[in-house]
Image (spheres, rainbow, N blue to C red):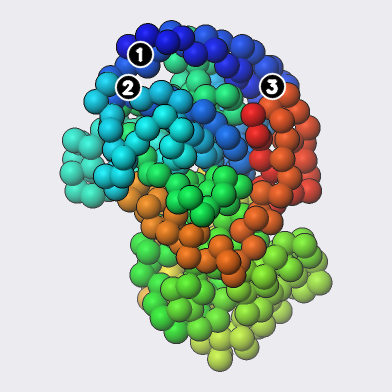
């Protein structure tokens, strides 16, 4: 164990419906292979809001309460355990190095890991699932520190990429990059993005960078649709203005030369979006399902649409950890032309986390952030 004790605050999450409690804890040290990260920014992701409400039950994933929520984060190395010298791209690590990392941790030895499906690791653990009332305490991003377990994938943040831009890399950006890779989105294809929150805006940007002929964003918040245009959407559909589902489908058909979308990405997070999204697909269309993480929800649909349309639905949970390295490169390359800084423009102190979650729930901010 590292000999130095580390004292810091956590926003303890006891149970849904209860306010976060700020508590100071002391970690005696870190073990071999571990990394102690000083959190500099942690965004409030939709799954954090769902967990706060209890609609996304972390206990169903093996988590325990009380815990510390938060997973979409960036930080600087505060301490290195024995044996840690370099990141996953073999860049030297030292105290003070800025890093990002997947918020889930793979064993690298199970059947799925060995087959290259590390996001399906049979022994997967992740942030937000550990107990906040026992060591290492720092088990989520809403805290002064986060403890990376031995063997974790970690990447150095390029000097030119600021914390507010880098914070979204390890969840929202990597997730949609992986989703579009999974369905092999091609140059010249038509892409529809359902939902223009952070994941949707990243999806718009990535789809354009992959050579989409046209990207269409659908949402009901004018500010987000304006952002979608800034991120590269060729057309937007406001569901509060075009209230009829069939009319929205007609608009998509017209915008795609009568063919329908080659790829539809669902990041709304509500089952009702899926039935509509499937109707927007053309022949051999691929539906990327990312947003629905609340277990037990359902919708009615006609399966013949899959058969006669040669269509495919791909569920995407987490991502391959190597995607995160490409996400950093994407941010570095496109930060001069895309307004990434507008995604996490609202910052709150750790003490104001309850206000931050209220703002996130009201969708006042695309991505509210906690800056400890």
Q: Residues within 10 Å of mark 2 (few under 14, many from 20)?
A: some
Task: Pinpoint residue 311: horizontal percent, then vertical percent.
Answer: 41, 72
Among the two numbered marks 2 and 1 on one chain, the one whose residue lies closer to the N terminus? 1
Which residue sits at x=39%, y=77%? 186
**Residue named by callout 3:** 20
Closer to the eye: label 3 or 1: 1
Query: Quadrant location of the C terminus?
Result: top right
Label 2 vs label 3: CA separation? Answer: 30 Å
What kind of element bears circle 3?
A: loop
Rounded to the nearest angstrom, the CA distance separating label 3 from label 1 is 30 Å
The residue at 49%/13% (across/down) is: 6
- Front one among 52 and 41: 41
Determine which residue is flagged by label 2. Answer: 81
Q: Position of residue 96 (x, y in %)?
A: 46, 33
Label 2: element kind: loop
- Of circles 2 and 3, the one toward us is 2
Closer-to-camera residue (244/302): 244
Name the residue at the bottom extreme.
257
Residue at horizontal 77%, vertical 41%?
359
Which quarter of the figure has residue 67? Answer: top right
Q: How many marks?
A: 3
- Asked if the residues shown at circle 2 and circle 1 are in contact, with their CB atoms under 8 angstroms apart, the answer is yes
Left or right: 16, with 115 as reference point: right
Name the one closer to the observer, 198 or 56.
198
Q: Residue at x 36, y 40 (%)?
A: 154
Q: Position of residue 305 (x, y in %)?
A: 47, 73
What residue sits right under mark 1 in the picture?
2
Q: Nearer the viewer, residue 229 or 53?
A: 229
- Give residue 141's quadrant in the image: top right
The secondary element bearing badge 1 is classed as loop
- In the figure, 263 relative to 361: above or below? below
User: Crowding near pointer 1: few (<14 within 10 Å), some, many (20+)?
Assistant: some
């Amino acid at each position: 164990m590292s000999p130095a004790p580390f004292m810091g605050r956590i926003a303890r999450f006891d149970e849904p419906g209860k306010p976060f409690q700020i508590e100071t804890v002391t970690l005696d040290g870190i073990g071999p292979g571990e990394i102690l990260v000083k959190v500099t920014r942690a965004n409030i992701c939709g799954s954090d809001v769902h967990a706060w409400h209890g609609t996304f039950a972390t206990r169903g994933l093996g988590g325990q309460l009380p815990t510390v929520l938060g997973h979409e984060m960036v930080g600087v190395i505060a301490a290195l355990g024995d044996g840690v010298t370099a990141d996953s791209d073999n860049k030297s690590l030292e105290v003070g190095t800025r890093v990002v990392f997947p918020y889930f941790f793979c064993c690298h030895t199970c059947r799925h890991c060995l087959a290259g499906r590390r996001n399906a690791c049979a022994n997967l653990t992740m942030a937000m699932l550990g107990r906040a009332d026992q060591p290492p305490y720092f088990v989520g991003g809403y805290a002064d520190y986060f403890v990376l377990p031995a063997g974790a994938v970690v990447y150095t943040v390029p000097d030119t990429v600021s914390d507010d831009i880098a914070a979204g890399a390890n969840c929202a950006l990597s997730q949609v990059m992986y989703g579009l890779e999974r369905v092999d989105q091609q140059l010249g294809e038509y892409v529809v993005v359902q939902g223009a929150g952070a994941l949707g805006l990243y999806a718009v940007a990535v789809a354009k960078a992959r050579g989409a002929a046209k990207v269409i964003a659908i949402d009901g918040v004018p500010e987000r649709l304006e952002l979608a245009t800034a991120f590269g959407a060729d057309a937007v559909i406001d569901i509060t203005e075009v209230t009829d589902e069939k009319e929205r489908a007609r608009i998509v058909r017209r915008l795609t030369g009568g063919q329908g979308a080659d790829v539809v990405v669902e990041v709304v997070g509500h089952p009702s979006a899926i039935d509509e999204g499937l109707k927007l697909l053309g022949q051999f269309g691929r539906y990327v399902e990312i947003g629905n993480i609340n277990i037990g929800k359902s919708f009615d649909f006609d399966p013949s649409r899959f058969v006669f349309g040669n269509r495919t639905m791909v569920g995407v949970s987490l991502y391959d950890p190597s995607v995160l390295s490409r996400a950093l490169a994407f941010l570095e390359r496109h930060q001069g032309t895309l307004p990434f800084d507008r995604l996490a423009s609202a910052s709150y102190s750790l003490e104001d986390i309850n206000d931050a979650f209220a703002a996130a729930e009201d969708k006042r901010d695309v991505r509210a952030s906690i800056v400890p």
